[in-house]
Image (cartoon, grey):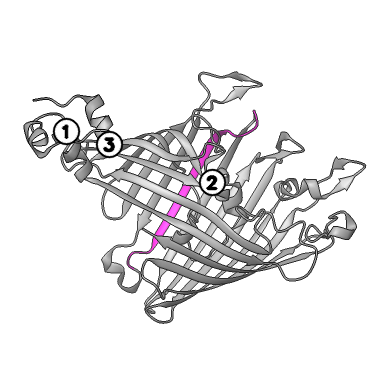
Amino acid sequence: MKIEKWTVGLAAAGLVALTPALLAQDAASKLVPVQTALSATTISGYVDTSAVWNPGSGNANPAPFAFNAGKQDGFNLDAVDIKIAKAVDEGSWGAGYVAELNYGPDAIAIDGGAAPIRQAYVELNTPIGNGLNWELGRWDSLLGYESSDSMKNPNFTHTYGKTFEPTENTGLLASYKANDVLNIQAGVANTLSTLGVNTRATAGSTPIESKKAFLGLITLTAPDSWGGFKGSMLYAGWDYGQGASTHDKSEIYVGTTINTPVKDLTFGASWDSIFHNDVVLAGVDTDTSYFQSIAGYASYKLTDKLTLSGRFEYADGNGLGALTAANFLTGGAATPSFNKVLDVTGTLQYDLWANVISRLEVRWDHAADSTTPFGGGAFDAGVPDKKNDVMVAANVIYKF
């Protein structure tokens, strides 16, 4: 006996009941393969929360790094992430999928306003060499040292390099692991910047059929023969294509994670260089020419539960001024002039509860030019008046 789709739907809604006899008779029907597929599906995600304090009065203009807006001097729900996935089946023609949804204030900065869809792609394996893997749909961008998910980073806050990097792309991504040392990834996408899920490159408002973005990343992993340095990684990537504006831009990225002979001591570094960077200035997509970020990382696991991490970054480029352009009012016109910044971050992480990341972080941002882009209080119309911005944050994340 076959149970119709509408009957199953009514049962799911609690409007009818399916007896054991009926379910047994239907065991050979299409419910069986559905159950088989679900048995290989995993559900994971996290709930990210924080409490942020910016010492001193007048915090109308906080440091404009990614995910920082609107979190000053209060408690925050940062993001809720739910990921449903099925790994590629074993075998020459294996297939799988990922569907990841992201909610909360950080979601728009991650998915370009396409919330709640962050990633959604079909993954296919073809029997070429060691196996050529394809991802078609919406996937995490290749470039960048830090992840949009702060729990995957040594620090809670993000760099300015991460602020300008794309987070998601819609297109086709190919990955090939040549051996245990070399992994190659290359992709083609609708746009380089993170925009709507199916947004196309345009000339004005007209889509351009042949205009696409191109991305590539090479990853080298140190083999076991390197002793204490085994597992260290070197990344080199490049992308080119149309961003949020109608002009093309390109980015060169180099990063490394270095394990050391000293147990639990790890170093990292990254360099991002963006040409014809684009940002939204006074509501208009603008070419801000050049931007670069240089960052260094260090983490040391003091005990099984306690880890100390530090980060230093120097960034420069007109794009920084554009991020805070609304803060510089001259005759009603936005005048960006914030071009150089230093930031130093220290993070203490203590894993007291199972599946929970709990961190205390202190961050200092310093305008390294002659500007005062931070600060601004209620009694001076929010006009920025500080060269320095200090933040103290507590971050608690539950992973499931």
| Whether residue 35 can be seen here | yes
Crowd around label 3: few <14 · some 14–19 · many ≥20 (10 Å)? few
Q: Which numbered dot is residue 31?
A: 1
Image x and y of residue 373, in percent = 79, 57
Q: Is residue 83 left or right of residue 396?
A: left
Q: Is residue 357 left or right of residue 97?
A: right
Q: Is residue 294 magenta?
A: no
Say which element carries label 3.
helix
Say which element carries label 2.
helix
Q: Nearer the viewer, residue 338 or 77?
A: 77
Which residue is labeled 2 in the image?
107
Quadrant into which the C terminus falls: bottom left
Q: Looking at the image, is mark 2 or mark 1 nearer the viewer?
A: 1
- Residue at the spot 73% in from the left edge and 71% down from the top edge: 55
Say which element carries label 1.
helix
Find out whether the residues at labels 2 and 1 contact each other: C-beta distance under 8 Å: no
Report the magenta residues as a range: 230-246
Q: Looking at the image, is mark 2 or mark 3 nearer the viewer?
A: 3
Crowd around label 2: few <14 · some 14–19 · many ≥20 (10 Å)? many
Q: Nearer the viewer, residue 212 or 138?
A: 138
Find out whether the residues at labels 3 and 1 contact each other: C-beta distance under 8 Å: no
